[in-house]
Image (cartoon, grey):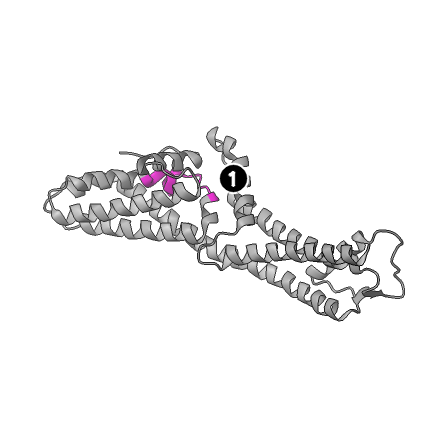
Amino acid sequence: MSGVQAWAVTALGAAVLAVGLRDVFHTLWHPSGHGGVSRRVMAAVWRAGRRARQQGRSSVLAGPLAMVVVVFTWVTLVVLGCTLVYWPHLPAGFVTSSELEFQEGPLFLDALYLSTVTVATLGFGDIVPVSEWLRVLVPLQALIGFALVTAAVTWVLQIYPALTRRRALAIRLSLLHRVDARRLVDDADSDLAAPVLESLATELVQSRVDLTQYSETYYFRDGDDQASLPAMLGVAVHLRGAAREAPRSDVRIAGELLGHAIDDFARIVALQFLRDGLPPDDVVDAYAADHGHQVTRP
């Protein structure tokens, strides 16, 4: 491999490594929470299970499986990127232990072995860099490997509280549906309707923020209708409509707040996961259908 080719391959490896690290940053720490690679991987896993959801078969593992695939993709990008960086500089940039000798011919597998061992922080020491910049890069890759483990744990810890809040809102809507909360909205003597509607609006705003920050939560399906926001969101839509005809002004205002919260949530869902431009009521139906549920309406 000529000098120009060697540095071209090295630059390609650096680019692959940069893509992986950028995706980790954007997925975990960027305010929008949108990593390009991870988003496409999770969407692909979700689409692969769409037929099962439409046929009523459970696919609650789509979200966790997609997370595993994304983490594996991150590791693959780091390993492949560093492999391409090391490959052109073998064997000149490295020395081996006395028991190991580089084989003649292409050394890609040796570079892949070195990259895999390094990112796994195993540190066998059988291949050691001697070039100054490689002596910096190899330990740096080991740190990246350790950081990926930490990042995966951090990701889980970030996502599951958001999922818990979403399920809690769904269960609350389910309870309101079971007690026929419209009676509360229509009661001119009750002081409970407005606070209930306002709290629903607040929780739905929180769900919208969670979906914006942790877009991967969309791909987690709840098998139980009563714990599924896609299934129970129709109850909030019904209460919004009932509040418009309420005899009390505070209930009507609270209903408007809930309506705006529903519209904003539907806009985010349509823009990021369905089809932009759908009316909010159609988004509610499509959201439920995409998760294999039917919208619950009183």
Q: Is residue 127 visible?
A: yes
Question: 163 or 74, which lies in front?
Answer: 74
Q: In the figure, residue 263 lies in which quadrant?
A: top left
Q: Is residue 180 left or right of residue 11?
A: left
Majority secondary structure in the magenta region: helix
Q: What is the magenta range?
A: 219-233
Q: Is residue 228 visible?
A: no
Indicate the secondary structure of the residue bearing disc 1.
Answer: helix
Q: Residue 61: x percent and y percent? A: 52, 42
Q: Residue at x 53, y 49 (%)?
A: 36
Quarter the C terminus occupies? top left
Side (left or right) of 32 relative to 105: left
Density class for disc 1 (Cα within 10 Å; few <14, some 14-19, many ≥20) is many
Reply yes or no: does residue 227 show up in magenta: yes
Q: Nearer the viewer, residue 226 or 126?
A: 126
Counting from the top left corner in percent of width and height, residue 130 is at 80, 69
Residue topped by disc 1? 46
Determine whether 290 is above or below 28 in the image. above
Write the residue at 49% across / 40% down.
Answer: 60
The furthest residue to the front: 4
Q: Is residue 6 magenta?
A: no
> From what the image shows, is residue 175 above or below residue 199?
above
Residue 282, compared with residue 145, is above or below; it is above
Q: Name the residue at 38% across, 40% down.
A: 230
- Work out which residue is located at the far top of the displayed protein and give it: 55
Q: Residue furthest bottom?
A: 132
Q: Position of residue 251 (x, y in %)?
A: 16, 47
Instruction: Tell me if residue 179 comes above or below residue 201 in the rendering.
Output: above
Frontmost residue, 55 versus 177: 55
Tell me the quarter of the picture where residue 289 sits. top left
